Image: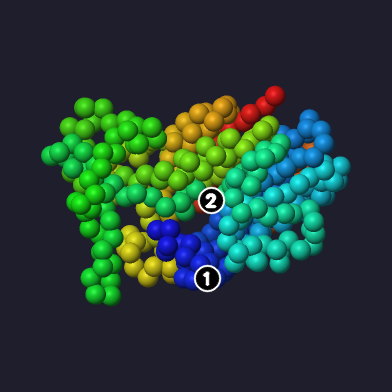
Amino acid sequence: MELALYCPEMGYYECENERVGRGGDFVTSVSTGSLFGRFLAFQFDSWCEDFSGSVQWVEAGAHDGTLAADILAAARDRSPELFERLDYCIIEPSGCRQGWQRKLLEPFGEKVRWLGSLQDLAPRGVNGILFSNELLDAFPVHRLGWDAAGKRWFEWGVGSVGERFEWRIMLEDVRDWTVDLAAAGFDIPPELATVLPDGFILEFSPEAGQWWRDAGHVLHQGRLMTSDYGLLAEQFLVPERRMGTLRSYRRHVVGNDLLAVPGEQDLTAHVNFSQLIRAGERAGLRTEALTSQSEFLANLAQRMWSNSSPPSPAQIRQFQTLTHPEHLGRAFRVLVQSRLS
């Protein structure tokens, strides 16, 4: 999954930047228009209004830089004084994506800087906001299956036959997943183990939990936030998800042939918010909210538009797309954790 998405020569997110939007493979909150960025700028400004000195807003997974441009433009218009003190950082290990971002964000000059990893923030830490949007759902996962007879999990690997790939049980790499899964919130009580269907599939991303924990450690003061597809751990273990949540997206069509055309289709698995919550709290953060994107943005809209001119027709259409249950409102959740002095 990591190679298919991030291989520098052939990875899905490395080869082209026209993947997102109506003309690409899928629509995101950012591709609907600039309103999502304006909402985030309003919220970040509110969260940082009592901060003195330099304030950092750190975005991880900025893709082509569109969300950063929307946030920076809104912050500049809304709060010039804060904008002067603002240090906008982008965590981006890919030189290719950095190139797209630098080109788009050139008008903001030295207001934006780039770092290769979270660890580059560690010496000083973050005073402000550390956030991501649709990042963690594209972290690589282990694809686990349930052996009902043995009451244990096994792992699906990928093999090749001629010119095509196929799923294979990794019989030579037997591992007890119990402890790792329990730490991520997947506690399987005996009564569930007796009825869990043979072959039930569950995705597990150690890297997502580790990334969130690392982000929590570098947050000196402020908030850690993400918006993404996801569920709580217990919501994965239901009959309708017996084939797991790992999906492919290509030309706005959801697919189940995950091994087809590697590098030419998006691969995404639902985020385990229970895992993130536990990881952040282990890093000393306090959980403030886990809510739907619809509820999160509706609250912001009420506050933002009550203090300014009413929204334009275009903004109303964007808001409906961002919050309607049949579009992006129900599928996405927003997690906010904090460390405040």
- Image spot of residue 134 (x, y percent): 53, 51
Q: Which residue is mark 2?
A: 134
Look at 53% across and 51% down and name the residue there.
135
- Kind of element beneath mark 2: loop
Q: Earlier in the sequence, mark 2 or mark 1?
A: 1
Characterize the local packing of mark 2: few (<14), some (14-19) or many (20 or more) Cα atoms within 10 angstroms.
many
Q: How many C-alpha atoms fall within 10 Å of the one at disc 1: few (<14), some, or many (≥20)? A: some
Q: Which of the two residues, 69 or 124, is positioned nearer the viewer here?
A: 124
The amino acid at mark 2 is Glu
Quadrant of the rendering where the N terminus is positioned: bottom left
Residue at the spot of label 1: 15
Does dot 1 land on a helix, a strand or a loop?
Answer: helix
Residue mark closest to the camera, 2 vs 1: 1
**Pick the front one: 264 or 211:** 211
Q: Residue at x 73, y 49 (%)?
A: 88
Contact check, label 2 and label 1, Cβ < 8 Å: no
Left or right, 168 with reference to 68: left
